[in-house]
């Protein structure tokens, strides 16, 4: 097991022998406690029992001590399908059963009541009130508890109540060897830490007790709190040998530090100080009671509230750029695709831009979903697509966040988005509200302002602040096409991430580590310091990430391939699964797909057994004009083709009419020549066909000879040679 991990909803905890098979089904970062379900029981019983609660530090300690295996839980594929897809697969009764159950427990599913049920005094009084309703469908408290438990265990989404089978859920976990039993801090250095530079030991209850005593000491002694001071005090009192000597009547005290193998690392101390010290207490120690009550107490919606470190919360904002984009298939340079919408994904803790998308609709969830995929994926392939050499790519953000705050989209309900994101990649995506409130809003707005003021406003086709009457409209001056503008934005984002001043955000550990003051430096430092390395997307199936965020669309399977938006796609999976054969013999059928809007070469499909299939655009002889394109210019091009095809059909009608008039005249001439001739009643082949062919050929040759003779007879023959031409020839000959 890797030592770098965080506790998140959907985390699957297993042991090699199978005795431990647990699912983290709810996490309260506010209370630092998690609800854990024993799947060895929940998957066997008809009704899943209530999850057990455990403090996150204790759960983390148990995972490390037992060297348990961690990975994202594999929920049934149906839980990530929309109702349209379920209906298309014949699951309409599932939806009816799900909705009926959810309507009964809906009053109990708020986040406050779920926390009260899991970690508080329970919700028995709420269930009793539901039973008192004369229209209540259930008569026992057990019915409510059983359904609520299933709802919580399988992700707190409506689709958790679908009647799917659970026997094979989450059975594909890794097998890793057990380490030794010494009290060492296990991690990347091997089972006994032999390959790691850090030789510190593991945290025990004795260490936690000492850390608590340091907090009590600081509360009594100092008015303000800092982690660096707390760590120094801890080391002074608990990680030093003290030697006292009496010299000339004066006691001299010498501190000799413990060996590293007998100490805790700075990272461990910081982690456990944060876990033991509640956030309100920390804020009171750092700022004082008066400032706390004024600026921190009972404040909801602050962008940084509860943010532990980098990748803990991503937030999204969008703006319409003040520039027109050139249509790439116009050689005159006079056609434009309009003004694009830029979506940026910001890591709240570091203010680093972790993802982007440039589209032409919205702002809406369609565009935000594309930006979130980009934020979670490695940027190498993305940058290479726009011609940025590998050695110039400096954008190391490829991690799954804990939370996401994004505008609510019109295309999807909150429940659909939350369900898919949670169950596919374990993101706790509750914050579907207007984004970037508080101080984070100023940061992203300044980023947009910088891009518009220092970059966009200097591009051809940009919109001036004050246009003069009579001037040419900016849409007629555009030069940048989509690909060139995206490349320019990538370079600007990399520059911002590596140059903006974030010195005021550096804490004591960051200063002591002597990191740079840029958003990217703060992001990387916090990722390792506070987030144990985060959740790299490289450890997750790429199809999962795309399926989690991208909106559903429909493609058609036909005998020759999969048609989507007029383009033809193919996958070996479809051929092996006999989809094309089925379409040939039984007719075409629909499938659900998802597409990256900035990349036409691929679309994705998720099968009912949970496989992610990538369909590739058919590209015969590498000549497809639609390959590797953003969908906006591609659709423009397809519309042009439709216009040309429509005009071609009109022209064909005219040609057919003209051709028919000539045919009618030709047939009339033939009938006139044959008029008056006796009817031919012969049955066998006519005699003399070959002789008639020879006669016709001789007549044609005679006609050609006569025509040639007439042309020569009518030609004007000069009386003598052209002297000037002869003189010129002589000059050329003797030069």
Image (tube, rainbow, N blue to C red):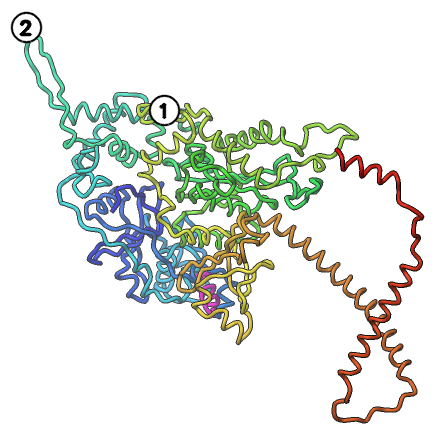
Tell me the residue at 16%/27% (across/down).
238
Indicate yes or no whether the magenta region holds residue 95.
yes
Horizontal side, residue 547 vs residue 485: left or right: left
Q: What element carries label 2?
A: loop
Tell me the residue at 63%/29% (across/down).
457
Q: How crowded is mark 2: few (under 14 residues within 10 Å), some or many (20 or more)?
A: few
The answer for how far apart the CA atoms under marks 1 and 2 are is 45 Å
Looking at the rendered structure, the number of numbered marks drawn on it comes to: 2
Tell me the residue at 80%/37% (across/down).
730
Q: From which residue to which does the magenta span run?
A: 91-104
Quick check: can you spot residue 661? no
Quarter assignment of residue 650: bottom right
Q: Residue 69: where, in percent of width, then height?
A: 25, 51
Q: Which mark is residue 602?
A: none
Q: Residue 478: where, in percent of width, then height?
A: 67, 36
Indicate yes or no whether the magenta region holds residue 459.
no
Q: State the predominant SS element of the stretch in magenta.
A: helix
Q: Residue tagged by mark 2?
A: 248
Q: Quadrant of the C terminus?
A: top right
Q: How crowded is mark 1: few (under 14 residues within 10 Å), some or many (20 or more)?
A: some
Q: Residue tagged by mark 1?
A: 288
> Which residue occupies the extreme top position in the image?
248
Horizontal side, residue 108 vs residue 343: left or right: left
Sequence-earlier tag: 1 or 2: 2
Q: Residue 245: where, in percent of width, then height?
A: 6, 13
As rendered, which of 475 and 688 lies closer to the eye? Answer: 688
């Amino acid at each position: 097991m890797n030592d770098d991990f965080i506790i998140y909803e959907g985390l699957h905890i297993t042991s090699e022998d199978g005795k431990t098979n647990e699912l983290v089904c709810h996490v309260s970062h506010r209370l630092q406690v998690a609800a854990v379900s024993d799947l060895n029981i929940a998957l066997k019983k008809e009704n899943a029992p209530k999850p057990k609660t455990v403090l996150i530090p204790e759960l983390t300690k148990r995972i490390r001590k037992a060297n348990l295996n961690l990975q994202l839980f594999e929920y049934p594929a149906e839980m990530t399908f929309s109702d349209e897809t379920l209906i298309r697969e014949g699951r309409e009764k599932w939806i009816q059963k799900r909705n009926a159950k959810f309507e009964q427990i809906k009053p109990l599913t708020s986040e406050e009541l779920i926390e009260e049920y899991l970690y508080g005094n329970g919700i028995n009084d709420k269930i009793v009130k539901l039973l008192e309703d004369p229209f209540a469908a259930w008569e026992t408290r057990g019915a409510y508890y059983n359904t609520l438990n299933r709802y919580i265990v399988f992700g707190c989404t409506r689709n958790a109540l679908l009647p799917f089978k659970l026997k094979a859920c989450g059975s594909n976990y890794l097998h890793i060897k057990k380490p030794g039993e010494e009290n060492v801090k296990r991690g990347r250095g091997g089972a006994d830490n032999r390959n790691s530079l850090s030789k510190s030991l593991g945290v025990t209850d004795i260490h936690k007790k000492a850390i608590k005593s340091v907090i009590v000491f600081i509360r009594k002694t100092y008015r303000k709190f800092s982690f660096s001071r707390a760590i120094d005090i801890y080391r002074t009192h608990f990680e030093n040998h003290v030697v006292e000597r009496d010299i000339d009547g004066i006691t001299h005290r010498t501190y000799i530090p413990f060996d590293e193998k007998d100490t805790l690392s700075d990272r461990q101390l910081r982690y456990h100080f944060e876990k033991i010290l509640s956030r309100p207490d920390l804020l009171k120690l750092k700022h004082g009671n008066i400032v706390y009550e004024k600026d921190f107490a009972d404040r909801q919606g602050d962008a940084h509230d509860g943010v532990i470190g980098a990748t803990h919360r991503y937030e999204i904002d969008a703006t319409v750029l003040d520039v027109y984009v050139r249509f790439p298939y116009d050689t005159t340079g006079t056609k434009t695709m309009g003004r694009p919408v830029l979506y940026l994904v910001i890591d709240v803790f570091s203010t680093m831009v972790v993802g982007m998308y440039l589209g032409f609709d919205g702002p809406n969830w369609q565009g935000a979903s594309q930006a979130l995929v980009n934020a979670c994926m490695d940027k190498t392939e993305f940058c290479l697509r726009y011609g940025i050499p590998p050695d110039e790519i400096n954008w190391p953000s490829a991690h799954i966040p804990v939370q996401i705050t994004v505008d609510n989209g019109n295309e999807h309900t909150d429940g659909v988005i939350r369900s898919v994101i949670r169950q596919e990649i374990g993101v706790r995506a509750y914050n579907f509200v207007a984004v970037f409130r508080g101080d984070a809003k100023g940061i992203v707005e300044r980023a947009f302002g910088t891009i518009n003021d220092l970059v966009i406003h200097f591009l051809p086709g940009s919109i001036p602040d004050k246009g003069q009457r009579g001037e040419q409209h900016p849409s007629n001056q555009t030069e940048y096409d989509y690909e060139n503008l995206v490349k320019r934005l990538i370079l600007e984002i990399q520059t911002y991430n590596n140059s903006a001043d974030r010195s005021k955000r550096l804490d004591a550990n960051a200063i002591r580590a002597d990191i740079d003051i840029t958003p990217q430096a703060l992001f990387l430092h916090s990722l390792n310091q506070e987030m144990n390395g985060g959740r790299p997307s490289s450890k997750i199936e790429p199809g999962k990430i795309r399926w989690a965020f991208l909106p559903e669309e429909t493609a058609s399977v036909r005998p020759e391939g999969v048609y989507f938006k007029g383009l033809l796609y193919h996958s070996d999976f479809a051929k092996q699964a006999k989809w094309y054969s089925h379409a040939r013999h039984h007719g075409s059928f629909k499938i659900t797909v998802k597409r990256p809007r900035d990349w036409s070469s691929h679309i994705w499909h998720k099968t009912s057994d949970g496989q992610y299939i990538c369909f590739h655009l058919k590209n015969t002889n590498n000549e497809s004009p639609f390959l590797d394109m953003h969908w906006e210019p591609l659709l423009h091009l397809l519309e042009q083709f439709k216009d040309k095809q429509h005009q071609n059909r009109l022209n064909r009608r005219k040609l057919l009419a003209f051709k028919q008039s000539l045919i009618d005249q030709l047939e009339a001439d033939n009938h006139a020549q044959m008029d008056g001739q006796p009817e031919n009643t012969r049955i066998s082949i006519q005699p003399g066909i070959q002789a008639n062919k020879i006669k016709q050929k001789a007549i044609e040759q005679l006609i050609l000879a006569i025509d040639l003779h007439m042309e020569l007879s009518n030609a004007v023959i000069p009386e003598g040679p052209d002297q000037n031409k002869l003189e010129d020839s002589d000059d050329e000959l003797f030069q």
